[in-house]
Amino acid sequence: MGYDYALVHIKYTIPLAGLLTFFSYPLFTRLDVVKTLFIVTIAFVATIPWDSYLIRTGIWTYPPNAILGPTLFSIPLEELFFFIIQTYITAQLYIILNKPVLHAQYLNSPATLPRWIKSGKTVGQGVLAGSIALGAWLIAKEGEGTYLGLILVWACSFALFIWTITAQFLLALPLACTVLPVILPTVYLWVVDEMALGRGTWAIESGTKLEFKLFGSLEIEEAVFFLVTNILVVTGIGAFDKAVAVCDAFPDVFDKPADALSMSLLRARVLPSSKYNMQRILGIRQAVSRLAKKSRSFHLASSVFPGRLRIDLTLLYSYCRLADDLVDEAANPQEAAIWIAKLDRHLALLYKDPDSSSAPLASQYAAENFPASALSALDLLPANLIPREPLAELLKGFEMDLQFSTNSFPIATPEDLELYAARVASTVGQSCLELVFCHCKHSLPPYMQAYLRNTARQMGLALQFVNIARDIAVDAKIGRVYLPTSWLKD
């Protein structure tokens, strides 16, 4: 009986797991809990038979004075815990690095899939199949390559399956979302393993290893093991996230969102990519791009919301930003007024008949009167979830801005200032709140909804007042004075 292996966990793995938990906890959702339990359970169950075989055949040994003693299928308790803690560490890092990313935008159908992703999937399948063949040859050959062969056959078989069904999604994700969650824990565990091997906490028996060390006491087989197992963890969670993305991206196909943890997730996992509504996906991409360029703070803040609500908030912001850009970037006040009139007409058509879908009329009008780059923002506005009034008031706020071009000052009194701020800022907050109400799992009582609506209005006023105070000098240079003229002296 000994404590060497237990001390490895106490010094190196548990503190890291605790640190990652500390950073992920504020944004950790029920879906993240399920995702973590899912991948930890699969890793634990899939590794036990393989690791037990290594120990029982004498390939892998643990000195009796380095472990506590209890075993399961000949596997020491500390090693069983390693299966869990390694998977947990890699999973938490993956979740943290993927929080800022809206996964739905990376879905593709066969028609929209970039050629390099198709090639990457094929190359990956070839590499994994070749690794399995190499591993089988090393096992059949016996001798010094046995341990490496067992690693390759075991890990690459799982990896080939996951890669085949998820590669198109994984390759589309930013490298920070997939490569970093593999590399960072792998390098860390290489260092930990090198120290453990150097102290004799565990050992690979001679005659089954290649006797090549990556650095220090780290055997090449151990380096490969940590690399491929972390790849399995990341690709496994990626497969889960693809189902989540599909479920949340298409509310017309799946009645319940992914965080409801219903059968919709399984249906989303098997839905053929050829049936994806790519017009909606491309619109989500444009909305995310507009959000990232125009408001990095809102883009980052949106990551705290669950998938389907996050998508709708992004689409709402995209519409508001588009409307603002059309008016601000107009060549003259007359053109700006025309855009406001067209936006108002579009809203009128979109909300024409609440009992039936009027989207086709609005889409046709948008196609005939707006540039192509604006169509997705107009068509994907979640009008079925928010009332028309806040959006109509937003347009009236734009009209107040146009009055500056006539050498008049529309904000004469504090009441005018409050009206302007409510129209251009509070309306957006109130629209966002309506989306939250729609996506909330538990209905709030009317008095609470009314309180929150008023609070959203006050928050919008406060933010707009801060913006006005910050830009007094800048606005004055372009002939705009947002302070009430009754406050100013000649």
Image (cartoon, rainbow, N blue to C red):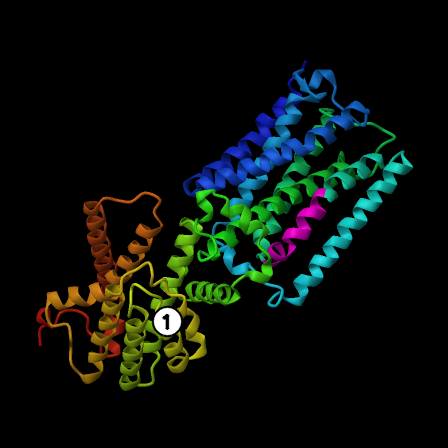
Q: Is residue 29 magenta?
A: no
Image location (x, y in percent) of residue 216: 75, 36
Tell me what residue is drawn at x 66 percent, y 16 percent. Answer: 70
| Element carrying mark 1 | helix
Image location (x, y in percent) of residue 380: 41, 66
Q: Furthest-top residue in view?
A: 1
Q: Is residue 170 magenta?
A: yes
Residue identified by numbered label 1: 322
Q: Please provide the residue range marked out in magenta.
A: 158-172
**Rendered view: 297 above or below 211:** below
Q: Residues within 10 Å of mark 1 (few under 14, many from 20)?
A: some
Image location (x, y in percent) of residue 424: 25, 66
Residue 489 appears in view? yes
**Rendered view: 292 above or below 437:** below
Image location (x, y in percent) of residue 83: 64, 31
Amino acid at circle 1: Leu
Q: Is residue 127 left or right of residue 395?
A: right
Res 343 quadrant in image: bottom left
**Rendered view: 235 above or below 481:** above
Res 318 quadrant in image: bottom left
Res 231 quadrant in image: top right
